[in-house]
Image (cartoon, rainbow, N blue to C red):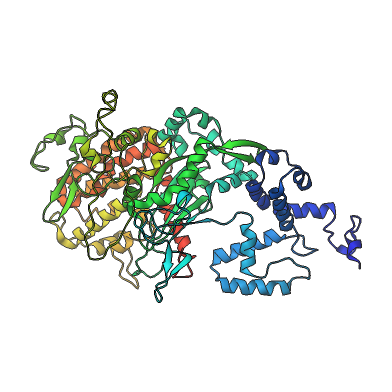
């Protein structure tokens, strides 16, 4: 039958689906209404999106570039084959590419699949037959990433004014790879590439989905009023930033973000030394059950290895910080599919999430030595143990109430009476003023066989004659406090960062502290300390309590405690220790486990946190009474600050590393080429 006759609008006999009829067109539109709408925001002007009625209407009056994009959309909406009513060209390609990504198919197998499928489909199908064509098609909708060349020694990125250079302006290292056989430069083949997944188009696309746009308003109408902390919207930091920036807080669609980064080995081989650093963003506008899901964790940067960037991580954060600064200063015109209107979308970065070493790299201070506490700073009470060759952090009796009996107990502690007050914690503004004239020096030039040079803080202070009138108003530079800083963090480029009362946090130290206690107690149970009962046996006692079974393998308490369900340690471990330890140490570990258990609840009472802060200080003092000084490393000391961070940031599970570590495991499964893991 003539195809032109079948395309008539009045054809409906014999069961054929007429793709030209109004009903079929409606079905086809429904295929791609969601996914195509996500990419229209990339090219269309948002004012035109608000008044958009039909594809043909939008085409009139648009410039040449937008006409080309309309042609791409029309091609994407084409049915997979003439009588197909379930898939369009775009939906079929996206579905197949999602299967490839989720199941780890190799490029070769995906190519062979694309070559085979067209022969199984009816004639006149429009499915691409190669992976190259698929990637080229998806790239036209801005679904890719931006490649930015970097210096191999982490000195700079070849962007903006350095984009056309062939050598690093600092270390003079070539930008291009070298042929080891001939010694010639492979011009056009960079030694190191940073991959940046643009965040502005992705945030705009979220509002192109009607359901997602509705979910992004959750925080505005669901703030807790009973004093309970259920979400970061209930935290002190959120309230303080809203009070400081009321115009930003008035728009319910403005975005609040958290940033997390950490290094991981992308290979399954444990002996391979390779450190890749993804930078992840999490959106706190959504409900508690949505914002920490893996679907809502965005990969923004992929910092290549094989070495960690260390203090030079700010070099790689530049593109992301520039976009965040643009989202704060100017904003982006965005179309909201839920309200069918446009608005100026802005975004704010609330805090960072990382472990302690990465925390030191991001926040730019030293996390080792006598001033190893990131919050206490120069007021950190530390002690050097010559035999153990380590700093320990004790003298926690200063944090107790002035009338507490522990202050005068010399025999219970180090033989001294300890009074005093806790030191003042520096806020963002104090740190910004302190590091105002700090000169950053980036780069990790690696020289084999030589000692690393010690970095001395550079102070480029202006002449005193020019600042005589302002010297009385400005604060004096604290040399002791300045000595613990390694750089001025790039986060201070964000205008609101120095006004934040909540510096980047390291909540994951909760897990590390508990695991460290488990390790210590394992050595104690084996009879290496006099405070244990000599007849105690760890394995038999746990078996007797039903916490461990001995079947095919010999499960000890250390294996049990290092399992995946680590968060059950807090309520269960005190039960396991009841018959192993005398009363004093047993009460101390029980109280600390109770503190962790209460702190990690999904809902935390804000009034109870102050009591928990006082209790954990007394608990750490009980540990000082029964344990040797080598036990008190920086992890134990950080316990006294966890209550404050929970009060400022909300429930702990929104700020710990578990979701991001699981996401890194997901990224690790995608590695197929060991030569180019990124």
Q: Is residue 549 above or below residue 477?
A: below
Left or right, 237 with respect to 128, comes to left
In depth, the one of 665 and 272 nearer the eye is 272
Count of marks overlaid on the render: 0
Left or right, 407 with respect to 495, comes to left
In depth, the one of 580 and 100 nearer the eye is 100
Q: Residue at x 61, y 35 (%)?
A: 343
Left or right, 284 with respect to 406, comes to right
Left or right, 73 with respect to 262, comes to right
Q: Is residue 17 above or below residue 342?
A: below
Where is residue 62 drawn, in percent x and y?
73, 44
Instruction: Please tell me in which quadrant of the rendered image residue 95 appears.
Output: bottom right
Where is residue 654 drawn, in percent x and y?
43, 45
Where is residue 147 drawn, in percent x and y?
50, 57
Would residue 547 be seen by someone viewing this image from the given angle? no
Where is residue 96 drawn, in percent x and y?
63, 65
Would residue 65 be seen by someone viewing this image from the given angle? yes
Q: Is residue 579 above or below residue 116?
A: above
Q: Is residue 290 above or below residue 189?
A: above
């Amino acid at each position: 039958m003539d195809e032109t006759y079948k395309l008539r609008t009045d054809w409906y006999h014999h069961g054929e689906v007429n793709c030209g009829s109004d009903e079929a067109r409606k079905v086809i539109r429904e295929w791609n209404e969601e996914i195509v709408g996500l990419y229209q925001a990339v090219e269309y002007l948002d004012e035109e999106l608000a008044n958009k009625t039909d594809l043909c209407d939008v085409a009139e009056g648009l410039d040449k570039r937008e006409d080309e994009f309309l042609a791409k959309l029309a091609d994407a909406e084409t049915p997979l084959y003439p009588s197909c009513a379930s898939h369009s060209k775009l939906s079929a390609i996206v579905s197949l590419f999602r299967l490839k990504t989720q199941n780890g198919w190799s490029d070769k197998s995906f190519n062979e699949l694309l070559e085979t499928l067209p022969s199984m489909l009816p004639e006149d199908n429009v499915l691409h037959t190669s992976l190259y064509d698929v990637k080229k098609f998806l790239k036209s909708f801005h679904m890719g990433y931006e490649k930015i060349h970097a210096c191999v020694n982490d000195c700079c990125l070849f962007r903006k004014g350095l984009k056309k250079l062939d050598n690093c302006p600092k270390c003079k290292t070539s930008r291009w790879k070298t042929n080891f056989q001939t010694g010639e430069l492979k011009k056009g083949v960079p030694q190191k590439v940073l991959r940046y997944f643009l965040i502005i188009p992705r945030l705009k696309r979220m509002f192109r989905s009607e359901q997602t746009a509705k979910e992004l308003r959750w925080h505005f109408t669901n703030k807790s009023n009973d004093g309970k902390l259920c979400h970061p919207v209930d935290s002190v930091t959120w309230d303080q930033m809203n009070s400081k920036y009321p115009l930003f807080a008035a728009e319910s669609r403005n975005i609040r973000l958290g940033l997390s980064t950490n290094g991981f080995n992308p290979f399954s081989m444990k002996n391979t030394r390779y450190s890749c650093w993804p930078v992840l963003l999490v959106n706190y506008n959504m409900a508690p059950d949505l914002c920490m899901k893996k679907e809502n964790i965005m990969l923004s940067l992929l910092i290549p290895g094989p070495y960690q960037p260390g203090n030079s991580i700010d070099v790689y954060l530049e593109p992301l910080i520039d976009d965040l600064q643009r989202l704060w200063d100017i904003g982006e015109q965005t179309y909201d599919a839920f309200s069918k209107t446009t608005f100026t979308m802005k975004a704010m970065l609330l805090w960072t999430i990382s472990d302690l070493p990465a925390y030191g790299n991001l926040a730019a201070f030293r996390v080792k030595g006598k001033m190893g506490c990131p919050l206490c700073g120069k007021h950190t009470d530390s002690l050097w143990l010559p035999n153990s060759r380590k700093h320990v952090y004790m003298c926690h009796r200063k944090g107790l109430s002035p009338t507490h009996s522990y202050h005068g107990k010399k025999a219970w502690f180090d033989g001294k009476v300890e009074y005093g007050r806790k030191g003042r914690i520096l806020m963002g503004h104090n740190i910004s003023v302190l590091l105002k004239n700090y000169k950053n020096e980036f780069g990790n030039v690696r020289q084999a066989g030589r000692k690393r040079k010690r970095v001395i803080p550079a102070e480029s202070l202006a002449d005193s004659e020019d600042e005589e009138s302002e010297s009385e108003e400005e604060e004096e530079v604290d040399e002791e406090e300045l000595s613990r800083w390694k750089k001025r963090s790039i986060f201070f480029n964000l205008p609101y960062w120095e006004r934040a009362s909540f510096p980047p946090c390291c909540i994951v130290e909760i897990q590390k502290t508990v695991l460290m206690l488990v390790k210590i107690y394992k050595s104690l149970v084996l009879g290496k300390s006099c405070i244990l009962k000599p007849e105690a046996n760890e394995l038999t006692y746990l078996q007797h309590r039903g916490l461990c079974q001995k079947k095919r393998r010999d499960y000890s308490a250390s294996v049990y405690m290092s399992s995946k369900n680590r968060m059950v340690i807090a309520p269960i471990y005190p039960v396991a220790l009841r018959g192993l330890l005398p009363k004093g140490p047993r009460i101390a570990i029980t109280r600390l486990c109770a503190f962790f258990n209460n702190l990690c609840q999904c809902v935390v009472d804000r009034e109870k946190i102050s009591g928990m802060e006082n209790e954990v200080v007394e608990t750490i003092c009980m540990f000082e009474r029964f344990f040797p000084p080598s036990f008190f490393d920086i992890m134990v000391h950080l316990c006294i600050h966890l209550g404050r961070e929970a009060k400022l940031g909300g429930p702990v599970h929104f700020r710990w590393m578990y979701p991001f570590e699981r996401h890194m495991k997901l990224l690790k499964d995608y590695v197929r080429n060991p030569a180019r893991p990124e």
